[in-house]
Amino acid sequence: MTRFQRFPTAPARLVLAWRAAALVAAALIVGVLLALSGRDVFVLGELVLRSTVGSRFGLEDLALFMTPLVLTGAAVTVTSRIGLWNIGGEGQFYLGAIGAAGVGLYLPGPQIIVLPLMALAAIACGMAWIVVPTLARAYAGVSEIITTLLLNFVAGLLTYWLATGPWRDRVTGALASSGRISDAIPELWGVVHWGFPLSLAIAAGLAAIMTWTGWGYEVRVSGANPGAARYAGMPMRGRVIAVMLLSGALAALAGMFEVAGTVHRLQGGMADNFGYLGIVVAVLARRSCLAVIPAALLMALILDAGIVLQTQQLAATAVLAITGLVLLLIAIGDELAHYRPVAPASSTRSGAAA
Amino acid sequence: MEMPSAAPGTPPVLQLVGICKYFPGVIANEDVSLDVRPGEILALLGENGAGKSTLMNVVTGIYQPDAGEMILDGYGAEFASPQEAIRAGVGMVHQHFKLVPAFTVAENIHLGWSETPRNASPAVLEARTRALSEQFGFPVNPSARVEDLSAGEQQRVEILRVLARRARLLILDEPTAVLTPAEARDLFSALRAFRAGGNAVIIISHKLDEVMEISDRVTILRGGRNVGTWETRECSPRMLAARMVGREIVPQDMRARAEGAAGRGTAPELSLRSVSIRDERGVETLSDVTLDVFGGEILGIAGVAGNGQRELTEVLTGLLSPERGEVLLGGRTAPPGADAFARSGVGHIPQDRLHSALAPSLGTTDNMALREYRAPPIGGSGLFRADAALALAREIAGLAEVRIPDFGAPVRNLSGGNQQRLVARREMRIASRVLVAAYPSRGLDIGAIATMHRYFAELRDKGVAIVLVSEDLEELLNLSDRIGVMFHGRLMATLDAEGADIERIGLLMGGRNVGEDAASGGGVG
């Protein structure tokens, strides 16, 4: 008799297989529901495919969505490696955008100097935004989940105030945003700017740091078991501070890329949930910095498909429901990947006793 | 096997027929049959991973058997939960107590019990508890909070809780692991009284002496299968050990030095001078401890767990710095920090390997690099060379004689014995001066314990100073050259292990100082 038993670890192969099955199941469920509500599923499906992966315009859009998602996803992933959760990606994204816009708007100079300065200002602002939660965590054990989350609302309002107040566009008189920033990240392919390959390189670099440096090793051990890190005399507090500041910098860089690469202005609401979606990306990536890239791709596909469906008079809430369905099914798939068939009567007995 | 003690026609309290229980890749129990009769104490003996706890979890409804039958008083029985089992009269006292620490004894006794009176005041519950306590002969203080009780008192509450629910079969999982010798004696006399009432007891153990002392019959499990059942009075500890491990165990006098072994050093390798530690509540957990450990000797630390042993090992390994007093390493003031201690040649086998010595979710490679990742070949110029780490992990696994199928797979997938061997070998590599081992054989089977002891003897013969903290007096007496006894954070005395009097150590463990310095000591008990 073959029975299924839950194992403590899920092999990557099984996770991938189950996730693929989850995506197919989600597509089927959505398809059936759309058909039941009287829509032509095949026309819709073709439209979604054509406007995401099936056309140059769609692919460019995907890359633009992926860029911030890779960075905010990486921001959450690095903290999860040390056992913490930075829920404040949204706020740090805004602060990165503010820092970059401030330099871009008010510091004239050659682009080759201004762009790096914008990036540095963004990183500094993002780190500043997370520094209080970081120190509270490292020295007083205050939950970083609450502190980082609450600062998001402050950052969002701060951005609205700047974009509609002191930094508002005095040229066109538009009320919702700052003036146009002339310095832009050079474009690489259509509207896709250099921020895209750079974000991929950053994710790969982080993966390398986690695997190939002593610092990354200490972060991994500290996250896997703080007791073992203390036992080995690792500087836990220093690692926590460094990782959280790094996380803030990554999310802020996403904000800078968005300002200097895509939007070219500071706008209220411009983070567009990229910070929160970074959490989803990190969960999908299962704590691997490299896996953040395909996870961000999937998230970008879902977002893009959602926009296409909205143009077809599907309510935004329906799109949100589809996103939720996909994530729910993937979570179920991840759990199922822990199960493997065991044949109890087999004569081969594993050496590892429970 | 015909039992003369059981009256003919009386069905066993519990009979298991062909019980099987499988876990992924592991046969926990296969075709296990046994019976327990009214008025007997059955010992269930076996190494770690032999399937003792799994079998009892099947009996008490925590697991359901994959095959086989359970017969209770002659009728087939199936338990979907421990609640159903206790309703049928089968109660278990687990190794780790399942009490609510913040509740009083009376509240714990009445928690989740159908006979608990509704809306009862604490006074009513306490009165009922007092009555139960007298009825069953387990003295408890009904109004005390469980968190304030000693391990032995908590165990009494656990047992009383089971007995109050009219259990006729009491199952105890390693009940003496947390008890002082005196508390263990009390427990045994209570179990004998329970047996005299026509009830049955199953006691899980791997302490042979204990099995010889308390049980009427012994059932031995090995590799999940029933090896056999014997009348205890026809057994000897030696024969039980041999059947348990499937081979003959040769007792060794571990104190004898190998030929050409390094002698005892003349200057202490590690010393404490009047060291005191306070915990965060300001309670002194280590009081004015002074000791010296010399190279080439094993210093045993005896005492009931929780009397300052954890703090002592943490001070000796640099994890805690003393509030008062001084730690000397090789005669000089020790550098601060666990990392500095490790680099100066102090190895540490901590008491809870999964909580501190290993990162359970990381692979064997990462775990074996824990002590040597800073220096070449693994470390150096900020890098972590995974290939060098893998080579080190292979080397340690080879020395520890542990077969690792996948060095990247989480280390928690290994058995407790294999984890401990890996940790021990990793620490022995860096322990050029001192090795501090806390409860190194806790939770291990006889074979793994023997390996661990051999490691210590080898290291001692190389001239390393070893501090061995243990609750097991036999282990301490076999291995140590000197034995220090801890009580309430104080080092009560240090005795020569050769010819040491067990009774005297027992008294010291209980806080009574007799003998040598009679001037400062209390009276004879």
Image (tube, rainbow, N blue to C red):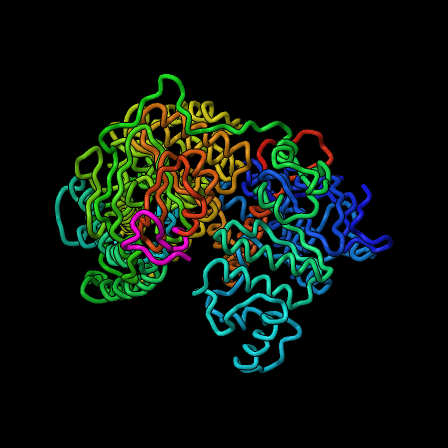
Is residue A113 in sight in this rendering?
A: yes
Q: Position of residue A205 (x, y in %)?
A: 33, 35
Q: Please, which residue is most extreme toward the top here?
A: B260
Q: Nearer the viewer, residue B156 or A70?
A: B156
Q: Position of residue B41 (x, y in %)?
A: 68, 51
Residue in the image at 66% along x and 36% along y:
B222
Asked if residue B140 lies in the magenta stretch, the reply is no
Relative side of A53 to A3, left or right = left
Question: Residue A137: x percent and y percent?
Answer: 29, 56
In percent of the image, x 54 and y 69: which residue is there? B108
| Position of A147 relative to A213 (above/below) | below
Prevailing secondary structure of the magenta residues:
loop
Residue B266 lies in quadrant = top left
Q: Does residue A43 appear left or right of residue A280 in this picture?
A: right
The answer to whether residue B79 is above or below residue A246 is below
Magenta residues, start to end = B508-525
In the image, residue A91 sits, relative to residue B461, either above or below, namely below
Q: Quadrant of the N terminus of chain A?
A: top right
